[in-house]
């Protein structure tokens, strides 16, 4: 008998791969069970519905992004908007590259959640994006950043960061650290006063 | 009797909306026919298969991006890498915002094409990304741009640009021109020498 927590994590991991490859709507509980080599009926000992699996994946992903951002900005250096944005970008790259499939499902499939859950995740996504927006706005107000619109700049950066989930390969040319370094550089430069 | 070309464009438009909302794998030819209020059998007078519809959408989208990039860089100003990159970014924003659903399907659903077609579109996507990469590399070589890796910078910019399809609303706060202006600014700054 597999311990319930381990089985749940296994279900989420396998389902992330299927939702990522084929989309949530095209994946059935039967598909997930088959990939796990268990009976569909056994799945229902662990999850009430396919949407519960999506909810679990999205909730775990949102929590991972939130905790990483908390940890990244929870120190003395975070009083400086430039350091804070660099830390937020680095943390985001780390979470995406640690689990690209889960991150990709979080970004693209959350709209298939039921209305209540979609609203809850929407609010958490907004709050997360607001960390970037506020940090950019703080940087603008102290003259460290320059941007026409902090909200557009935050969206620009977050879509580029989320895009990493679509192309990152653990065995690819670039290490996670190299990607983090270059994305921090691009992000900070994108908000610097253009010397031209 | 609706003229064939017009009906094909209508099929592509409706299918783009469904593929965007629910994903290619979860959409049937019957769903597309229903949304058009025609019989599924009538659909087959116009298209051989669901994959043909996806192929048509993706091919038209790829052609739109290629033509816009050609037009944007096909003038005297294009000899300057900074002007050329600004023109490429502006053209990309225009194509995405002109048809966000089609652009979104192009970016996320093309992997559902058959192997031959996927290879053909993959090659066109690579060639399109190479325009950005070469322009950035040209800018680095003449000292107009600064970046650790032109390829990473091109991917950073293109994922941010493609992300517009996920949040742009024609009736939203930002006009297409305002988005283009701000994305050009962010893109050029992201490649400028950091004055800090």
Image (cartoon, coloured by chain):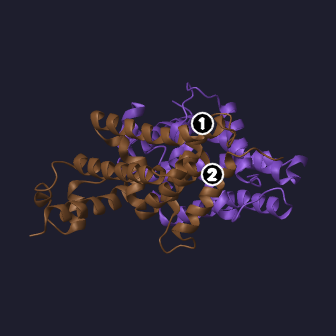
Chain colours: A brown, B purple
Side of B25 where A176 appears, left or right? right
Above or below: residue A128 compared with residue B155: above
Q: Quadrant for residue A27, please give it.
A: bottom left
The residue pinned by badge 2 equals A187
Which of the two labelled residues, at mark 1 and mark 2, occupies the earlier sequence position?
Answer: 1
The circle on residue B168 is none
- Whether residue B153 is visible here, answered yes or no, is yes
Q: Nearer the viewer, mark 1 or mark 2?
A: 1
Q: Residue A123 versus residue B94: which sits nearer the camera?
A: A123
Instruction: Give x and y (percent) for residue A12.
Output: 27, 58
Q: How many marks?
A: 2
Is the residue B145 above or below the residue B23 in the image?
A: below
Residue found at x 69% / y 39%: A143
In the image, residue B32 above or below residue A11 = above
Q: Position of residue B63 (x, y in %)?
A: 66, 49
Mark 1: secondary structure: helix
Q: Give the residue number, with chain letter if any, for mark 1.
A: A137
Q: Position of residue A3 (x, y in %)?
A: 13, 66
> Is A110 left, or right, of A81 in this rendering?
left
Circle 1 marks a residue in which chain? Answer: A
- In front: B30, or B80? B80
* Element at label 2: helix
Is any part of residue B56 visible from this angle?
Answer: no
Q: CB under 8 Å between callouts 1 and 2?
A: no
Q: Residues within 10 Å of mark 2 (few under 14, many from 20)?
A: many
For disc 2, the chain is A
Q: Are marks 1 and 2 on the same chain?
A: yes
Separation of marks 1 and 2 at Cα, in angstroms: 14 Å
Quarter of the image where one finds residue B81: bottom right
């Amino acid at each position: 008998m597999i311990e319930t927590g381990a089985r749940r994590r296994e279900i989420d991991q396998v389902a992330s791969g299927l939702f990522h490859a084929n989309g949530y709507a095209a994946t059935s509980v039967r598909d997930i069970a088959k990939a796990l080599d268990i009976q569909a009926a056994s799945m229902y000992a662990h999850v009430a519905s396919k949407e519960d699996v999506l909810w679990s994946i999205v909730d775990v992903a949102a929590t991972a992004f939130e905790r990483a951002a908390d940890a990244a900005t929870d120190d003395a250096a975070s009083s400086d908007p430039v350091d804070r944005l660099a830390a937020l970008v680095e943390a985001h790259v780390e979470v995406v590259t640690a689990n690209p499939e889960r991150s990709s499902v979080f970004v693209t499939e959350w709209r298939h959640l039921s209305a209540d859950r979609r609203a809850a995740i929407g609010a958490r996504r907004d709050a997360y994006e607001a960390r970037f927006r506020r940090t950019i706005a703080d940087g603008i107000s102290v003259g460290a950043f320059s941007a026409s619109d902090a909200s557009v700049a935050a969206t620009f950066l977050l879509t580029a960061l989320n895009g990493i989930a679509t192309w990152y390969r653990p065995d690819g040319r670039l290490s996670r650290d190299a990607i983090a370094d270059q994305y921090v550089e691009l992000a900070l430069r994108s908000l610097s006063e253009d010397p031209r």
